[in-house]
Amino acid sequence: MIFLETLRLKFYAPHAHFRIAQSSSSRRTYPLPPYSTVLGLLANILGDKKIIEKMLSSTFGLGILSRFETLTREYTWMRNFHKEAHLQRFKRVENRKFQEFVEHPGGQSPVTVNVLNDVEIILYLYHPEEEIIDTLLENLDCPHRWQSHLHLGRSEDWAIPVGFKKISLEPSRNPIHFSSSGSYYQWMPEPDIAFVEDSGLLDNFRKLYKHVQGNLTLVTALYTLSEVSWTDKSNRKQTATIRNFDHIPARLFKGSIPFISVTSLPEVYCDPEIQVPVFLAKIDPKKNGG
């Protein structure tokens, strides 16, 4: 039996919003953070640029679980401070009144934002460099080493560490070890991108992936910085540096582990303490950006 030594990190967030990029006027949220958001959180905890680069220089495994109590819709204003937007709403540069009321400068539009409340996030990290694991464990108790306050997604969505330790993920097909599977959302990466070292376990995972249901999503992961250029409405050339994200195809999974044959459940990694299966994605800087 091949155990996988990982670091398990638990966080609590009073509120969280993991925006679905394709949503706009009504900003929808995933029920759990994408890989890119979690990588940003880990980098924040590590703090030092050299150790962050060391983390991203090797292939490692990352699993994400999440659950929340309620979902609410916040009604807010999104603002645009371009001169053109201001003129479109107020007609004159020096004017800030609209229908007899003074407003902020620029353009503005009402937006509904879906927000998760009382969120529990559980992260599983396997990394070949023990220094990375030890630094994360040490820095979680040393907030002065963080790059900023801990947050998931929006800066106002503070994340509070509530438990962290090294654990062994255990290959199992015992139904007891899957009993809490339906309590958490998690990403189930495509088998070719799953972090599964043993060929027998990988074969079981391929069979499981074919049997489960769930929306297939392109989940943001690592990114590279790219320069882009365009011509604006005044026919002037503009340039900017953007983050060009790589994406990991993964199913959004929450539910029971199905039988892969008439008599057997698949053998997959699980956390026997929480009694959930754990699906790790392979984060490879050579393939997933850098």
Image: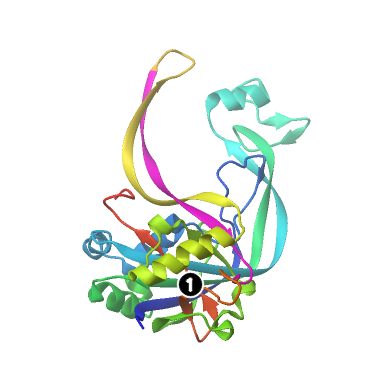
Q: Quadrant of residue 282?
A: bottom left
Q: Is residue 203 left or right of residue 180?
A: left
Residue 234 x %, y %: 46, 13
Q: What residue is drawn where x is 55% and y is 51%?
A: 216
**Residue at figure coordinates x 50%, y 85% from the top left:** 272
- Mark 1 — residue? 278
Q: Secondary structure at mark 1?
A: loop
x and y, in percent, of residue 261 in the image: 57, 70
Query: Looking at the image, which residue is at 54% across and 77% down?
Result: 276
Q: Nearer the viewer, residue 68 or 266?
A: 266
The answer to whether residue 134 is visible is yes
Q: Main secondary structure of the magenta part?
A: strand
Which residue range is magenta in the image? Answer: 237-258
Circle 1 residues within 10 Å: few <14, some 14–19, many ≥20: many
Three-letter residue code for mark 1: Val
* Residue 247 belongs to magenta span: yes
Answer above or below: position of 37 versus 177: above
The answer to whether residue 245 is above or below residue 169 is: above
